[in-house]
Amino acid sequence: MRLLLVEDEASLAASLKRGLSADGFVVEVAHDGRTGLWMASELDFDIIVLDLMLPTMSGFSVCQELRKNGVWTPILILTAKTGEFDEIESLDSGADDFLTKPFSYPVLLAHIRSLLRRGVRERPVVLNAGGLRLDPATRTCQRDAASISLTPREFSLLEYLMRYSDRAVTKRELLDHVWDPDFEGSPNIVEVYVGYLRRKIDRPFGTESILTVPGGSYRFVTNEA
Ligand code: CA
């Protein structure tokens, strides 16, 4: 999942980026409002975590501007201020959720997960498809009663494929959303990891969950018997 973090406190931004990256997110950081607005408008993110008090442009204005321009990426606003006024203002500006600083990292993660579930449409807490069960909160994967151990990268890849199982997903999209944005290796890495996944989630069970679609895309099959 690609996450844009707009936060001007350098140390907070760095520690959140570290934590979120370790949890499988592809994180890009903007340190001021205008840069954040530009990145959110021009690049493709699954979620935006937006600080309220920012140099060059406030989080409210960034949020309002994005919604005015038809960018509907889920937005979680971080605010150091407290009080009902900010809550109302945050939600009225088009944000989906807000969190008051200081917050604990697990709480932030829970808010992010909750927003990702909503996505374009309401999405379940635990992904269940084709006999496969993937729980992003506990990072566990099961087929029927069998636990499957996945690396963080394999988990992120499978989560993305399952969340977008209604369509074919291109290798480029997977590279952008599952790998680091600075990744400069061969796109064939996606093929290699799809191979790892198939060896874990399908081959031992005689199933075929990840179809190769002509043209270099993949589609997760939801109605695998
Ligand atoms: Ca700030």
Image: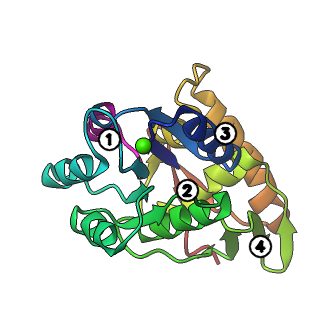
Q: Quarter-wise, where is residue 44 in the image?
A: top left
Indicate the position of residue 43 as horizontal and vertical percent values.
34, 36
Q: Is mark 3 within 8 Å of ligand 1?
A: no
Indicate the position of residue 64 as horizontal and vertical percent values.
19, 54
Q: Callout 4: helix, strand or loop?
A: strand
- Nearer the N terminus, badge 2 or badge 3? 3
Q: Callout 2: helix, strand or loop?
A: helix
Of marks 2 and 3, the one in the foreground: 3
Indicate the amino acid at tag 1: Ala
Indicate the amino acid at tag 3: Arg
Give, as a single range, the part of the protein colored magenta: 35-46
Question: Circles 3 and 4: CB distance less than 8 Å?
Answer: no
- Nearer the N terminus, badge 1 or badge 4? 1
Indicate the position of residue 61 as horizontal and vertical percent values.
21, 48
Residue marked by disc 2: 161
Residue marked by disc 3: 18
Question: Circles 1 and 3: CB distance less than 8 Å?
Answer: no
Q: Residue drawn 68% across and 70% down?
A: 135
Q: Residue drawn 48% across and 46% down?
A: 3
Residue marked by disc 4: 143
**Most frequent secondary structure within the magenta stretch:** helix
Of marks 1 and 4, the one in the foreground: 1
Q: Residue drawn 36% across and 50% down?
A: 52
Question: Circles 2 and 3: CB distance less than 8 Å?
Answer: no
